[in-house]
Image: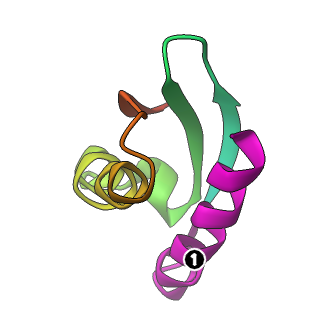
């Protein structure tokens, strides 16, 4: 599952990089929570939580419904 998540994040990465940010996969927990680290401009952006929930989480859950949540660490 971790490799599938990493591959899915690769499709999101170019959109974040356009705005000077990036995303790094950290972990997939036993509770089915994906942990990511926002980098660059995304790390300090006031909209970062919205990016995680409305962007990254939505996309990952569409592809893998078993994912419970995505959290930034």
User: Residue at image x 36%, y 43%?
Assistant: 65
User: Residue at image x 60%, y 62%?
Assistant: 9
> Considering only vertical position in the picture, is 55 above or below 15?
above
Q: Where is residue 50 in the image (x, y as percent from the top left)?
A: 22, 51
What residue is shown with label 1?
A: 11
Q: Where is residue 35 in the image (x, y as percent from the top left)?
A: 56, 31
Can residue 51 be seen by looking at this rendering? yes
Asked if residue 5 lies in the magenta stretch, the reply is yes
Can residue 73 be seen by looking at this rendering? no
Q: What stretch is highlighted in magenta?
A: 1-22
Horizontal side of 41 relative to 53 (left or right) equals right
**Among the 4 quarters of the image, the one containing residue 26:** top right
Q: Where is residue 64 in the image (x, y as percent from the top left)?
A: 45, 48
Q: Which of 57 and 24 is in front in this view?
A: 57
Q: Nearer the viewer, residue 28 or 13?
A: 28
Q: Is mark 1 on a helix, strand or loop?
A: helix
Determine crowd level at label 1: few under 14, some 14-19, many 20+ residues with C-alpha closer than 10 A: few
User: Residue at image x 31%, y 61%?
Assistant: 55
Quarter of the image for the C terminus: give it: top right
């Amino acid at each position: 599952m971790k490799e599938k998540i990493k591959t899915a994040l690769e499709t999101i990465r170019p959109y974040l990089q356009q705005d000077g940010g990036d995303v790094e996969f950290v972990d997939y927990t036993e509770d089915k929570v994906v942990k990511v680290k926002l980098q660059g401009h995304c790390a300090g952006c006031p909209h970062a939580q919205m990016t995680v929930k409305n962007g990254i989480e939505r996309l990952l859950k569409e592809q893998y419904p078993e994912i419970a949540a995505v959290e930034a660490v």
